[in-house]
Image (cartoon, helix red, strand yellow):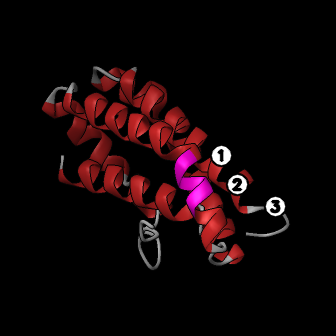
Amino acid sequence: MRKLTVLVACLGLSVAVAGCGGGKRDHEAVMEDMVAAMEEFADTLGKIQSKEDVEKYKDDLEAISKKMETLQKEATALGDPPKDLDKKLKEKFSKRMAAAMGNLMGAMMGMPEDVRNEIDKMDIMKSTPAPAGGPPSPE
């Protein structure tokens, strides 16, 4: 349970700093993909209610986790957005991000403890690094 709780927190922080962070795409595109991945992760977790489900969705969870790791690297490579863009991104994505975090927590808390323990054994944390720096400051 503890590892899964930390994962949910890391996912939330990853989304929060995705607006700050790779490559040839812009901040908004990366943030959109990060929020979508977080929503997909929550939806997948919501389908898991048994140890058999853990096995059934294991590859999906690992793939989403890997996608989020890639997005986080892309976000980090972009660097901080200008303040006006940072504000725009917060306005655009804050409700979806909060809903996704709520869905993640709801899915996690709705699972039987033995199922959460099975997910913890997957060690998907290694594919979802904690973001550097922390969430952007509200302004």
Q: Residue beneath label 2, please?
A: 28
Question: Considering depth in this image, is 128 or 115 the residue closer to the camera?
Answer: 128
- Say which mark, if any, is on residue 98: none
Q: Position of residue 45 (x, y in %)?
A: 39, 30
Q: Is residue 136 above or below residue 38?
A: below
The disc labelled 3 sits on which kind of residue? Arg
- Residue 45 belongs to magenta span: no
Among all residues in the image, which is located at the extreme right?
Answer: 24
Q: Residue at x 56, y 60 (%)?
A: 87
Kindly tell me whether residue 80 is visible in this rendering: yes
Report whether 7 appears left or right of 70: left
User: Is residue 92 depicted above or below 78 in this figure?
Assistant: above
Disc 2 from disc 1: Cα separation:
6 Å
Give x and y (percent) for residue 138.
42, 65
Task: Say what secondary structure mark 2 lies in.
Answer: helix
Q: What's the residue at 40%, 53% (across, down)?
A: 12
Instruction: Work out whether residue 21 can be spotted.
Output: no
In the picture, which quadrant includes the C terminus?
A: bottom left
Q: Which residues are magenta?
A: 87-91
Distance Cα–Cα, label 3 vs label 2? 8 Å
Q: Nearer the viewer, residue 54 or 90?
A: 90
Look at 70% across and 54% down and name the residue there. Answer: 28
